[in-house]
Image (cartoon, rainbow, N blue to C red):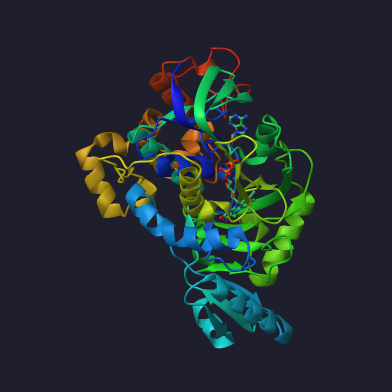
Amino acid sequence: MKTYDVAIIGAGVTGTSIARELARYKLDIALFEKEEELAFGVSKSNSGIIHPGIQNSPDSLKGRLCVQGNFLIRDLSKELNIDFKEVGELIVAFNEEEIRELLRLKKEAEVLGVPRLKIVDKTWLRQNEPNLNAEAVAALYAPTAGIISPYRLVYGLAENAVRNGVEIFTETKIENIIYSKPNFEILASKGLFRSRHVINSAGLFADEISKMLGIDYFKIRPRKGEEFILDKKKESLIHHLILPLPSKTSKGVIIIKTADGNPMIGPTAEDIEDKEDLSTSDSGFNKVLSSARRLIPSINDKDIIAYFAGLRPVAGDDFIINHENKAPGFINVAGIQSPGLTASPAIALLVANILKDNGLEIKKKFIFHAHRKGTIHLFQSPLLKIEKIIKKDPSYGDIVCRCEMVSAKEIKDAVKKGAKTMDGVKFRTRAQAGRCHGSFCATRIMKILAEERKILVTSVTKRGKGSEIVKEDRFCFQE
Ligand SMILES: Cc1cc2nc3c(=O)[nH]c(=O)nc-3n(C[C@H](O)[C@H](O)[C@H](O)COP(=O)(O)OP(=O)(O)OC[C@H]3O[C@@H](n4cnc5c(N)ncnc54)[C@H](O)[C@@H]3O)c2cc1C
């Protein structure tokens, strides 16, 4: 049996960032994911904000890693050819007391090294954010805040990691780990694996993985966040991310510019027990809408086209990133709640250093392919460019999803790059993400998925086994 140098459990943004970082070195690396596709855990349902690093305690690990991650993501997104937009954020104050709180936040963030912060006044706000509540008196402006597509980041990291030699095993649930000095025997749903080091980046289930080795000093508690997406026609509702003053447990309801243009409002922050509960609620909706309207009064509930919930994996106030002496070679990367997306490139660097400090001999590869060829997304391209793209390859002109302008070629490319399910296609291409939610294009996408994967249409699923869409193969695909 092959002995890997490093086994990483969980292919969310944390696990794929670590895999891609370690792929620089001469190491045999395996990345395990229990779901059918990558980014189907917490990393698929978040706000997509690259936070500047305000609102974290200056002595916290997550505070330090957030600021560093915000800096690192700029080069990383260029290397991976993923759209990162530095849109800036405004934390809004409505009275003198709140302005004092802004000044406190500014001072705290400056200790952490957040650059270019300034307090802007009412006149600035009027000019730069005309839809903001006229009663707002000032805001803390952080120009380094940005937005990114969280799933496209994971897919970009994973593709690049594979290009550099990482092996990815999907639908491979880790069921037990035994420390058999100096290796770990990893019992997975697809068989037995062996590795010298194990990194636990299993998100909501990191406590259960750690417990397999008798390390149980933390528990992951899900903190639910419900989010509501507005129609793309409202793209210019806001020009920055708009935030209220934060509470102890969350950054509050934010008006978010997303990477794909739709504004989004949310999230809520509710501690729950069930790690699988992704339901949304009327109370969540009402809370989000009223909090969002306090910032932008013109938000119309009729413009909300979709909603979802995500669960933050909370293990106390801070991230847990530790080498565990009880099982030398085992590293917990747990409790990666917000701002985990932002911090992920910095977490990966920290983990590489922890491995070095604990005896892993790492030598740089002679050749590391840092750059990933970009994917064509028609919805991101200006019309003139689209004309040229279609002229060069007419299959880009075969539009499948009309709401989001996604072609058959883009869907086929997504399948070639690893999309296996309807959600996988949606996250990669945006097909089905528009106002009609796939009413017009779902059958065509299923047909493409079945043809490209050489499977029956009855085997096409929304998000993995158990979510099949048609029961009998009586589906008529005649065109
Ligand atoms: C509503 C919400 C909004 C957020 N907004 C932001 C934001 O704007 N900016 C920001 O920086 N952060 C944000 N976050 C936080 C961010 O989403 C998380 O920190 C990040 O996605 C965590 O990634 P992860 O890889 O650690 O976990 P995950 O993405 O959950 O990855 C863990 C993976 O491990 C797999 N796994 C679990 N058990 C096993 C097993 N036994 N065997 C194999 N695989 C297993 C899971 O299937 C999963 O894919 C938000 C979170 C939420 C919920």
Residue 189 lies, with reference to residue 110, above or below; the image says above
Q: Is residue 8 left or right of residue 288?
A: left
Q: Quadrant of ligand 1?
A: top right
Q: Which residue is more in the foreground, 121 or 357?
A: 357
Q: Is residue 285 left or right of residue 133?
A: right
Residue 203 lies, with reference to residue 82, above or below; the image says above
Residue 80 position, x and y percent, is 35, 47
In the orientation shown, which residue stands out farthest toward the top? Answer: 473
**Can the viewer see residue 354 in this picture?**
yes
Q: Is residue 342 left or right of residue 209?
A: left
Q: How many marks?
A: 0
Residue 64 position, x and y percent, is 55, 62
Residue 130 lies, with reference to residue 36, above or below; the image says below
Residue 255 position, x and y percent, is 60, 63
Q: Which residue is more in the foreground, 307 or 101?
A: 101
Q: Residue at 61% of width from left, 83% of height from top?
A: 138
Q: Tell me the quadrant of the picture where the C terminus can be found.
A: top left
Kindly indicate the quadrant of the structure image that contains residue 231: bottom right
Q: Which residue is more in the foreground, 84 or 385?
A: 84
Q: Residue at 51% of width from left, 71% of height from top?
A: 114
Q: Is residue 392 left or right of residue 326?
A: left
**Can the viewer see residue 297 in this picture?**
no
Residue 62 position, x and y percent, is 59, 58
Q: Residue at 59% of width from left, 63% of height from top?
A: 63
Kindly indicate the quadrant of the structure image that contains residue 377: top left
Q: Residue at 39% of width from left, 49% of height from top?
A: 379
Residue 350 lies, with reference to residue 291, above or below; the image says above
